[in-house]
Image (cartoon, helix red, strand yellow):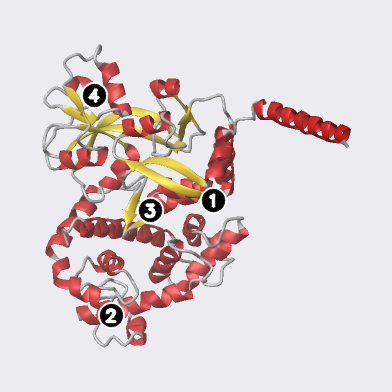
Amino acid sequence: MKSVVVKWCGAALLVTFLLGLQGCTPQPTPNQLQIVKERQVLRVGTLMNPTSFYYDHEVEQGFEYELAQRFARRMGVEVRMVPRFDVADLFALLQRGEVDIVAAGLDETANRRELFRFGPPYDEISHKLIFKQGSRQRPRDWAQVDDGEIVVVQGSSHEEFLRALEDEFPDLKWRSTSDHDAVELMRMVDREEIDYTIADSNQLEVQRRAHPGLSVAFTTQRELQVAWALKSTSDDSLYAAVIEYFGEVRDSGRLAYLKEKHFGHVKQFNYVTTSLFIDAVEQQLPKYIDLFKQHSGELDWRLLAAISYQESLWNPRAVSPTGVRGMMMLTLPTAKAMGVKSRLNAEQSIRGGARYFERMLQRIPARIPEPDRTWFALAAYNIGFGHLEDARVLTERQGGNPDRWLDVKQRLPLLRQKQFYRQTKFGFARGDEPVTYVGNIRRFYDTLKWLDEQGRL
């Protein structure tokens, strides 16, 4: 019996010893991708601005937010945006491992590539020297920028670029600041509080909707690639996932869709049109703003007001050569169907136009999500539901997605060409007009939203 106990104790000691040895064996270190999945959260550093990330009625929005959210969903984790106002702060967070990636519309530079790793480029921008139109003579190159100071964001690629110019242009006056972000600097130029700034082309396009006085002196840098930044490390797991993700969204058309959704309507800028609209907001809109709010129903009243401006410039007595008239430019049959007795009565026209637009929205297939659903309804309001359906059929025949505005707006102009409209149910249509129509309304709507958020309506 004693022998058995001794043997058992010896075996137990041996097992304990072996387990101890196993515990001393180094366990494999989880890679970056595993850490994100175990954490169940992807931490994304970003800039708080209209082109990357912002809150709309306390709801997270923005191009970079949607791009990052889709990447996180693909990995089966949640996304947590970590917004900052300073690029240098974002890179410090990345260096300390407090964020996993930086997604902020950042262009790659030589200095940044030495410190960080960049994913595949998903956009291309240029840099513009900006001044207030009418405030000075437009400089054509750096040699002509001799009567004012350039102010840029500290830690930005603009600062890096200006520093590299110092030897060639030692008299160039410039400084960097951490007190203002790029958007604020553009607005300061518009208010003539500073002379110049350098702006990314995509941010400038967005800001010009509300600040049409921002004028381009010249392009300082062209064809700059924009990409996500990751910490420079020998661990390729998260980096590989980013590469695979951008290959997928590019091939599937999702990247093009997101660009269209956020920026498709801001590429075309017209100084006169934008300036006249802002003047009308100050002078004409106050007369009718209560009517838009009263009759908007489930619609955003600002969208209804944008439609009305595109239709009539907020002129209740507007009349077109084709016979449409009033604030919402209703045809006689449409007015009768909507219960409008006088199309030249501002209230009746706004009420009738709102109900007619709601009818267009209801006819758009329920499977089409927002905001495409609204863009389709706007096109139908302009060209008619039948012609819109013709364009959607053409889109499907050509291999496009008939439920995506990006694809359909490319086919709408084909309704002017006999080889295409002869195949359709409703025939010829000026299909280029609804494309312009929708783009204009989107710009007016965005400007109204921004002015409303600033308390200027």
Q: Position of residue 354 (x, y in %)?
A: 32, 76
* Label 2 vs 1, first from the N-terminus: 1
Q: Residues within 10 Å of mark 2 (few under 14, many from 20)?
A: many
Question: For the residue labelled by badge 3, is the local secondary structure a helix, a strand or a loop?
Answer: strand
| Amino acid residing under circle 3 | Gln
Q: CA distance from mark 1 to mark 4?
A: 46 Å
Nearer to us of marks 3 and 2 is 3
* Up-down relation of residue 179 to residue 421 (above or below): above
Front one among 180 and 84: 84
Q: Amino acid at mark 4?
A: Asp
* Badge 2 element: helix
User: In this picture, is 129 found above or below 253?
Assistant: above
The reply to whether discs 2 and 1 touch (Cβ–Cβ < 8 Å) is: no
Characterize the local packing of mark 4: few (<14), some (14-19) or many (20 or more) Cα atoms within 10 angstroms: few
Image side of residue 52 versus residue 312, left or right: right
Image coordinates for residue 118, horizontal then vertical, percent: 48, 30
Earlier along the polypeptide chain: callout 2 or callout 4?
4
- The reply to whether callout 3 and callout 2 are in contact (CB within 8 Å) is no
Name the front one of labels 1 and 3: 1
Closer to viewer: mark 1 or mark 4: 1
> Circle 3 is placed at which residue position?
61
Q: Which residue is mark 4?
A: 141
Asked if marks 2 and 4 touch (Cβ < 8 Å), the reply is no
Q: Amino acid at mark 2?
A: Arg
Q: How many marks?
A: 4
Q: Give the quarter of the image for residue 314.
A: bottom left
